[in-house]
Image: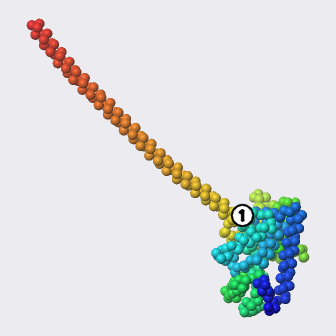
């Protein structure tokens, strides 16, 4: 067996440096599992409960968000096929990967894998983890090497077929152009948050507890808190300009009185002047995410239920209309039958009257003839 290969496990090791990196990663996995076990032990054998909220990309609690993201990252690095593009997971051959990954990670926590919001949040976390894993593989195992060198040095936990797909993507000229453009766009971001590895949502939740006595901070104050560098104690020039503009607008609104302008409106106006794609307010749950046209799983469920109710309502109206039409037909038929019966009765009555009249006329005629005969006889005998 050649140096740097481990046929017993089916994985290859690129170099001594990578072996050390892999050792560190395994140690990190063991440490994370140890922390989870300690949590379970401290809480009487209960696993950490993960609370999910509609419209949130991460659990609000920072500890929950950190543990869940960490477990998803570990699973992605050690057990998952790293697709060249997220949409590849919708292909039949890979469609099982994300659902199975969610179920695997969920075993370490107390969470409902059937809940649509939970699945939606976990899917977004895995999407971020896969993107980060692609970046790490490209940075550590592809950059600075020829295609042949990269293909011959397959990293650990990546199958040969998966690795070839990734290398072919990264070496594609069109992909390299897109990558360079994306890098320029990232460098052009004006307001880089200073929250470290913690996402806006978790940071927002933690600040509420630590600084604002469980009250929601003003979006303007939260902007300041998330853009101050802990080392320097200052904001970047761009962030400082934006924050100053927010404070000025807030003072103007307070001094003018009349129509009140919320802090969220002020932040939205200022950030819109600097960038058209800021996700700051949407991360606080105060604004829908810009450019986002895909609804969440629970929103889709609500939409589905609303459509079902509308469909049932429409079917009920149609059924009621049909019943009403049938009822009207029956009423019309009954009215027609009644009219026919009345007409028949009227005809019969008129026939009886006519017959009676004819009999009376015949009787009157006979009576007149009798009277005439008696009168004749009386006159004859009297003479």
Colouring scheme applied when the structure was drawn: rainbow
Is 111 positioned to the left or the right of 94 in the image?
A: right
Is 312 positioned to the left or the right of 184 in the image?
A: left
What residue lies at 37% left-to-right and 35% top-to-bottom?
Answer: 342
Report if residue 9 is visible in the image: yes
- Please determine whether, in this image, residue 360 is positioned above or below residue 124: above
- Please determine whether, in this image, residue 83 is positioned above or below residue 243: below
- Please determine whether, in this image, residue 217 is positioned above or below residue 237: above
| Residue 56 figure quarter | bottom right
Report if residue 60 is visible in the image: no
Front-most of residues 328 and 39? 39
What residue lies at 70% left-to-right and 79% top-to-bottom?
Answer: 83
Name the residue furthest left.
383
Name the residue furthest top.
382
What residue lies at 82% left-to-right and 66% top-to-bottom?
Answer: 64
x, y percentage for residue 209?
87, 62
- How packed mark 1 is, by other alpha carbons closer than 10 Å (few <14, some 14-19, many 20 or more), is few
Q: Which residue is denoted by mark 1 in the rendering?
A: 114
Is 201 positioned to the left or the right of 361 in the image?
A: right
What is the quadrant of the C terminus in the image? Answer: top left
x, y percentage for residue 351?
29, 31
x, y percentage for residue 219?
80, 65
Check disc 1 and report its element: helix, strand or loop. loop
What residue lies at 81% left-to-right and 73% top-to-bottom?
Answer: 70
| Residue 145 figure quarter | bottom right
x, y percentage for residue 321?
51, 50
What is the quadrant of the N terminus in the image? Answer: bottom right
């Amino acid at each position: 067996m050649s140096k740097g290969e481990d046929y017993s496990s089916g994985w290859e090791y690129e170099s001594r440096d990578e072996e050390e990196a892999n050792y560190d990663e395994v140690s990190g996995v063991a440490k994370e599992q140890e922390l989870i076990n300690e949590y379970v032990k401290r809480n009487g054998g209960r696993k950490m409960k993960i609370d999910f909220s509609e419209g949130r990309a991460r659990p609000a609690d920072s500890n929950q968000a950190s543990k869940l993201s960490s477990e998803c990252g570990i699973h992605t690095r050690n057990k998952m096929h790293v697709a060249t593009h997220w949409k590849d997971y919708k292909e039949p051959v890979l469609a099982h990967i994300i659902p199975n990954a969610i179920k695997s990670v969920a075993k370490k926590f107390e969470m409902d894998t059937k809940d649509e919001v939970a699945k939606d949040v976990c899917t977004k976390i895995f999407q971020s983890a896969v993107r980060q894993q692609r970046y790490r593989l490209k940075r550590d195992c592809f950059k600075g090497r020829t295609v042949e060198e990269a293909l011959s040095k397959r990293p650990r936990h990546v199958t040969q077929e998966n690795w070839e797909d990734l290398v072919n993507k990264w070496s594609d000229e069109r992909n390299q152009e897109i990558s360079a453009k994306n890098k320029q766009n990232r460098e052009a971001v004006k307001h880089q948050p200073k929250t470290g590895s913690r996402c806006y949502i978790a940071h927002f939740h933690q600040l509420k507890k630590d600084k604002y006595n469980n009250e929601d901070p003003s979006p303007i104050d939260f902007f300041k808190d998330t853009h101050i560098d802990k080392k320097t104690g200052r904001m970047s020039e761009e962030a400082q300009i934006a924050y100053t503009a927010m404070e000025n607008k807030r003072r103007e609104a307070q001094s003018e009185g009349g129509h009140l302008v919320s802090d969220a409106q002020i932040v939205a106006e200022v950030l819109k002047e600097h960038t058209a794609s800021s996700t700051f307010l949407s991360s606080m749950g105060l604004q829908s995410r810009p450019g986002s046209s895909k609804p969440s799983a629970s929103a889709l469920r609500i939409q589905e239920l609303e459509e079902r109710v509308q469909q049932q309502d429409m079917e009920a109206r149609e059924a009621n209309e049909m019943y009403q039409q049938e009822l009207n037909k029956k009423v019309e038929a009954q009215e027609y039958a009644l009219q026919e019966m009345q007409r028949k009765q009227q005809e019969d009555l008129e026939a009886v009257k006519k017959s009676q009249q004819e009999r009376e006329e015949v009787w009157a005629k006979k009576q007149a003839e009798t009277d005439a005969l008696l009168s004749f006889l009386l006159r004859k005998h009297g003479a």
